[in-house]
Amino acid sequence: MKLHKGEILFRQGERGSLFKLHSGLLKIVRSHEDGNTTLVNIIVPGETIPHHSLISPSAYYATAIALVTSEVEVLPAEPWYEDLERNPDHFRTIARQLQEKLRMMQQRIDQLTAVAPAAKLLKMEAWFQTYIGTLKLTDVLTQEEIGQFIGLRRETVNRLLREKGRKSD
């Protein structure tokens, strides 16, 4: 299935299939009772989601939205879980996927724990280049989302991007 930028793959609270991202990027956005949303994760090619439902079914924790044109494989839930029961070796594959996600999250923690705001932004940009190639970070995420992802206010992100733009002139 092909998703274009801004299209929703699944919505928070719904139940259904699992998905494997073959190309592109997805953002995972959690809605709160007050109507605010928070960017909680970025899904990169090779990941099967939702992570919390790889072994047992659960409602979607958040909404998945395409950041760029993305190719996604739909993995119907019932056959997925039946296959796990018949082939316990598949748990090893799932464990490896989750291990890779944990390593990615450790890199995110490094971004969040950098002391200087400029260092946080630089680490995030370096991490993203692995997945977005020649696109600019601001072509994929809003300043608000960048701030949520690295623990900065949007205004701080705006200032850092302006300063960076002046340095590259």
Image (cartoon, grey):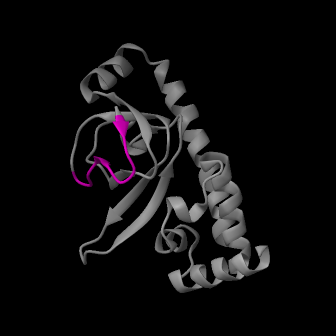
Asked if residue 11 is among those painted magenta in the image, a careful observer would answer: yes
The x, y position of residue 133, in whole percent, is 65, 48
Which residue is at a point 64% across and 63% down the rendered structure image? 109
Query: Does residue 55 show up?
Result: no
Which residue is at a point 26% across and 52% down the rendered structure image? 11
The x, y position of residue 21, in whole percent, is 45, 36
Residue sitting nearer the eye, 146 or 137: 137
- Residue 17 vertical position relative to residue 116 in the rendered view, above or below: above
The x, y position of residue 1, in whole percent, is 34, 31
The x, y position of residue 75, in whole percent, is 33, 27
Which residue is at a point 67% across and 47% down the rendered structure image? 130
Residue sitting nearer the eye, 46 or 55: 46
Q: Residue furthest left?
A: 14
> Which residue range is magenta in the image?
2-13
11 left or right, relative to 67: left
Query: How many numbered discs sit on the rendered protein?
Result: 0
- Residue 46 vertical position relative to residue 105 in the rendered view, above or below: above
Q: Residue furthest top?
A: 86
Residue 74 lies in quadrant: top left
Q: Quadrant of the C terminus?
A: bottom right
- Residue 97 vertical position relative to residue 149 in the rendered view, above or below: above
80 left or right, relative to 168: left
Asked if residue 40 is among those painted magenta in the image, a careful observer would answer: no
155 left or right, relative to 28: right
78 left or right, relative to 122: left
Q: Residue furthest front?
A: 169
Query: Does residue 70 show up?
Result: yes
